[in-house]
Amino acid sequence: MQASKPSARRWLALMAVVSAYTFTFISRYVWSPLMGIVSQEFVLNSAQAGIYMSVFFAGYVLTQLPGGMLSDRMNPKVVLIAATVLGGLAAGMMSLVNDFSLGIAFRFLAGLASGFVMSACSKVLTNEFAPNERSVALGILMASPPFGITLANLIGPLLRDNYGWRNTFLFVGLLAVLVVLVLILFVKNHSPVPETTSKKAPFTEGFLDFAKNPNQWLVVVAGFMFLFTTTGFPTWIYRVTEHLGFEPSQRTLIAMSYSITGIAGSVFSGVIAKRIKMNSRSFLMATHGLMAAFSLVLVINWQFGLFFALGILYGFISYLPASHQTALAIQYSKPEYSATSVACQNLFMQTASVLQPVFLGGLIDSTGGFSIIWYAFAITMSIGVIAIRATKSPENPKT
């Protein structure tokens, strides 16, 4: 069932799901500013400290597909509340751990909980927003990742230095209580199964609907290339700018500006596409092409001022495609399987963030320089343009 009533309540529902999705990124990335002090207390080496992030991601990947299937067959509001409660408990319990192994268990649990959230959020927005407004809503939702990362990097050090790392995790756990209240108040209950769908349909039917559609796989290819690039920039930008001779404060400023302008790009992506009257497919081709071009511009060893300005533009452009990737997954799916399609897309796209550091690290080692990164980004985004160009236009281009 798809709702399209022009009420203000749907924007409150959007605010609620944004808070839930943002919480998962705060929970994930708050570990970064706490890593050093926890490593000292537990006597962890760098590999062990890194495992705390890796196991979160492992849990996150495992529940992508189940999350989409449940959100299609159940009330997505219930899925969101349950996942947020579980994620909050896992974060809060980190404040009580006294050894490395127990911490791994709670981080893995937090990742499992987070994996249910994205597809449930997209299902709520599919129900709440009319097709011609959905890309705007999804654009705001997709600002959650950079927003959550930014908040984690702001409040993490502040709470750590004033209250200790254990109370920082406890604060994150308690933050889930506020998110749950917002979800209860502002997200409506929706019929779990549309009237046109049999409740006896196989549980895997949504996945099969996705798997049999070549357009979905072409969008996944483009999304993989997109995520390869957008995770690659923050992964390597400190090394790149260090190689260029920038001061530590300058390197931090470039990295933070990329994240902040990424929030703006994601928020306004749907509005921009609607204003210039481009559907999601055309908008993706245009923005992927822009990212390819800007990547080649960054090959030049610019001085700080110009590199900083280009980094701001690159950050803004880099987050323009995200909501339209999700919008296309919904367009190419049957309405009753929209959450499963989003989950499948996210599952396969996320492999890029795993492969990218190793692949680019190997290229850097083999070439002895960092310019290869920008050439790689130009190639990946060009492949994205080709993949989207190969898709067929959806039946309802306004979706």
Image: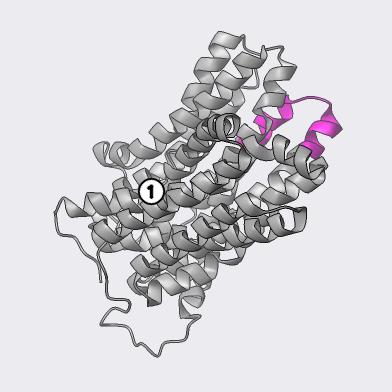
Q: Is residue 359 visible?
A: no
Residue 375 among magenta residues:
yes
Instruction: Pick whichever, 187 or 164, lies toward us.
Output: 164
The residue positioned farthest toward the bottom in the image shown:
200
Q: Looking at the image, which residue is at 39% across and 42% down?
A: 283
Q: Quadrant of the C terminus?
A: bottom left
Graded by Cα atoms within 10 Å as few (under 14), some (14 to 19) or many (20 or more), the crowding at tag 1 reads many
Residue 231 occupies which quadrant of the picture? top right
Where residue 246 appears, as percent x and y from the top left, is 67, 12
188 vs 266, left or right, is left
Judged by its main secondary structure, the magenta piece is helix
Q: Looking at the image, which residue is at 42% across and 41% down?
A: 143
Instruction: Judge whether 331 appears above or below 354 on screen.
Output: below
80 vs 218, left or right, is left
Write down the region rendered in magenta.
Answer: 361-377
> Circle 1 sits in a helix, a strand or a loop, which is it?
helix
Residue indicated by mark 1: 19
Instruction: Pick whichever, 159 or 352, lies toward us.
Output: 159
Residue 351 occupies which quadrant of the picture? bottom right
